[in-house]
Amino acid sequence: MNAALDDPPDQPFDQPGALAPVFEQLLRMSANGDQPPLHVIQFGDSHTAADEWTGGLREEIQQRFGNGGSGFSLAGRPFLGYRRFDIRGGGSALWHSEGLRTGAGDGFYGLGGVSIETTRAGQSVYARGECDSLEVDYLVQPGGGAVAVYVDEERRDEFSTDGVQMAPGAVRYDLSPGLHTFKVVTLEPRPVRLFGWVADRNAGVTYEALGINGAEAGVMLKWNEIMLATYLQRRSPAMIVLSYGTNEASDPSWTPEAYEAMFSSLLAQLRQAAPTATILVLGPGDRWTRTRYSVRLVAGIDWVIAAQKRACAANRCVYWDTRQRMGGRGSMRDWVDAGLGQIDYVHFTAAGYRRLAEVLFADLMGQYEIYKKARTEQAGF
């Protein structure tokens, strides 16, 4: 296992040339301190929702290129186990969540595919993090209620979420650099739906983890396309990362052909919404399933990886084969034996996610150095 991780292949990515746009932005950021922040957004399932893997990547990237803040995070605690290590928050009890892994509902879930809503006055959500600016993302809707915004316990603003039709809403506030606590409180018994916070710093990189436990990639196609595109364009991500496939591998409703068509459609939609962004797909890791007396491989991982690779090739997207970098088919047993995989043979331990983050970051930086060298040679320096 360690040999596979420590001895990367000559080319760990499929379609590595599609990394050029994000590498160019990183290069300019390194050369010029006055460059605007660079945003990376990862959508995915429980591997993303845990924020262990993404948290490790965030630390590695921000140590090298600067801390841009937490960026977008979901409001409140929309589901059990939701967390972000770079921003902490919560809320009062009378909010209910919509969207989640099934995507059931009207599709107006903001950037992260999850919203929280209440019809009660006096309900609140809060968060605390380092930032230079704050944005509150919410749903404009007929009959929407008013809210108050507090920053560091001082009332900063009040606004209504009422509007003639459902639409994405956002208000932004400039703050002094530093650690801030912010809170939104409903002021009347009318519906208020919140999507999340954007807590940015004026420079550096954000790595925004938007995972939903149990989710499959197709759930993103259930989100309102215009709303998702609007918020993506507000964030202007340099890179969009997709990390799905673990759940689809054991879902009997999929055929390889249908899954490939769906995944290709999702990539095309994201490409249209964010045409300048690099799209990186992280394939599913190796997975086993437990029976009464033993564990056995989940064979569906094979066709999921193959379908994702074909969809990425057709849509000029980068692909990183997580299972292959783990050590290949069957490698999860070795990870569990080494204390890097959990005994469900699906998820990783904190140390395992950290190891994956180190390997992926090293692979990305290896390609970044190749890009820098080629760019320098092309410029004739």
Image: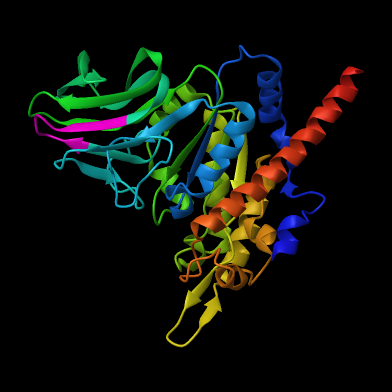
Vertical order, 271 against 342 (above or below):
above
Taking the image as drawn, is residue 183 in sight? yes
- As for residue 118 lying within the magenta part, the answer is yes
Is 178 or 284 nearer to us in this picture? 178
Relative horizontal placement of residue 309, taking residue 3 as reference (left or right)? left
Name which residue lies at 51% across and 60% down: 348
- As for residue 310 lying within the magenta part, the answer is no
Relative horizontal placement of residue 282, taking residue 81 as reference (left or right)? right
Extreme residue toward the bottom, this view? 293
Magenta residues span 117-127
Residue 71's spot in the image, x, y percent?
A: 45, 28
Color encoding of the figure:
rainbow
Is 205 or 154 nearer to us in this picture? 154
User: How many callouts does the rendering have?
Assistant: 0
Relative horizontal placement of residue 366, taking residue 291 as reference (left or right)? right
Residue 290's spot in the image, x, y percent?
A: 46, 78
Name which residue lies at 61% across and 11% down: 34
Which image quadrant: the C terminus? top right
Vertical order, 284 against 287 (above or below):
above
Which image quadrant: the N terminus? bottom right
Extreme residue toward the right, this view? 380
Name which residue lies at 65% across and 41% down: 315
Vertical order, 307 against 333 (above or below):
above
Residue 133's spot in the image, x, y percent?
A: 40, 17
Residue 44's spot in the image, x, y percent?
A: 48, 48
Taking the image as drawn, is residue 167 in sight? no
Name which residue lies at 42% across and 34% down: 225
Vertical order, 342 against 39 (above or below):
below
Q: Residue 76 appears in which quarter of the rendering?
A: top left
